[in-house]
Image (spheres, helix red, strand yellow):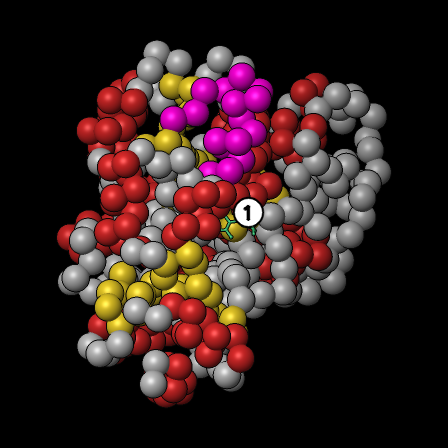
Amino acid sequence: MSISQPQAQPHHYQPQTLALNAGLQLNPNTQAISPNVSMSVNHQLTPGDGGFSANGCGDLTQLPFSYAGWTNPTVRQLEQRVAALEHCDDGYATASGMAAISAVFFSLLKSGDHLIIADVCYAATNELALQMLPSFGIEVTSVNLSNVADVAAAIKPNTRLVFAETPCNPLLRLTDLQALADLLKPQHILLAVDSTFATPVITRPADFGVDLVIHSLTKFINGHGDALGGCVVGEKNLIESIRSRAGVYLGAVISPHNAWLIMRGIETLYPRMNMMCQSAHQIASWLENHPRVSQVNYSGLSSHPQYDLAQKQMEQPGSVIVFQVDDMDLLEQRFSTEAKIFYYAFSIGHQRSLAVLIRTDELMSATYRLSPEQQADYLRYAGQGVIRLSIGLEAASDLIQELTEMLR
Ligand SMILES: *Cc1c(COP(=O)(O)O)cnc(C)c1O
């Protein structure tokens, strides 16, 4: 049994339309309009379909499907949809965002290669790169990618990949993707960007020349806090080699059930992001004028140190806000025991608003390896610690009311 062709081709439609239709394939037996969850691990083979080696099978995503570790009809629809929204050829979906990041590292880097990674990014990414990769013979340098001159200075003859995250966790510092791509392209160094905080609604890194765009689908793209997932999208050959190595050898595959949930989440990504960004902007402005708040970082405020870059690279200001108060412990206590509509929890991008305290000393001792200058830059954004808010879909007025009580 085959499934019919995709219903919507990327270049014809606006992204809001593609969020509903790109990659969607109807089951020809039922013509059901929503995708089926295809849970089958294997598919009947036709003689000559390919051997048992992943490398011997050519394009693993070509019909007919054979084994779910290589690709699956439901997962494939998700991959095509994210790729279409990111203006990329193809995508590979993984069990989590970290699986997508490790897929990129372990598929593209080998012993003797050099990786340049953002000095401040998602903690597990930083720890994987700085604490694990060197034991596989991979050289790693952590650089503040906001300073393109520092990146240029860090490049070596064996530099293979630069890994950025913008806006970065937990500072919301930005990286100029165009400037970085312009530096790296002529030197044939790959540029990968974790765009989880931005989503394709806000920034499409491939438009600036980025080679690989990575998402934790767990966050905004699923948007409902009920499924882990990740993906990497980019040019077809690159994605194909990541799929055959990370998917088949490392087993990074996503469950079709999660892929289906995430695809349902994507369908409302645009209206959700619009509302969340609008509320976050209102709340960030309100926080900035609150007497107990000493600093707010939010890319929609003109006080953001890279406001001009935000205007150039981001279509909306995002829904994550970080801010500082003098008594962090008291605020943490109130959020965790008194808050009714902010949940005191990790993660971002869910329909419910989340708050969490991120302490600078903990990150400095466990995660980041920063030079004195890098540390000074970190402190400029985050001081001794920040409260990170991920604004959800509640009425902004209710959220402001709760924040008023938290900051009393
Ligand atoms: C959450 C997150 C990840 C990791 O994603 P998981 O799906 O939790 O594995 C990676 N990068 C960023 C920026 C994130 O916010």
Which of 350 and 76 lies nearest the eye of the viewer? 350
Q: Residue at x 37, y 43 (%)?
A: 120
Residue 263 locus on image (x, y percent): 58, 59
Q: Residue at x 53, y 26 (%)?
A: 133
Kindly state the secondary structure of the residue where label 1 is placed. helix
- Mark 1 close to ligand 1, CB under 8 Å: yes
Please say if 90 is above or below 352: above
Q: Please tell me whether residue 283 belongs to the stretch shown in magenta.
A: no
Please say if 241 is above or below 126: above
Residue 385 locus on image (x, y percent): 36, 58
The reply to whether residue 321 is visible in this rendering is yes
Please say if 254 is above or below 90: below
- Left or right: residue 48 versus residue 372 is right
Residue 301 locus on image (x, y percent): 20, 65
Residue bearing mark 1 = 97
- Left or right: residue 209 versus residue 72 is left
- Quick one: quadrant of the C terminus? bottom left
Q: Residue at x 57, y 34 (%)?
A: 103
Please say if 132 is above or below 193: above
Quadrant hosting residue 299:
bottom left
- Which range is magenta? 126-141
- Left or right: residue 147 versus residue 325 is left
Residue type highlighted by circle 1 = Gly
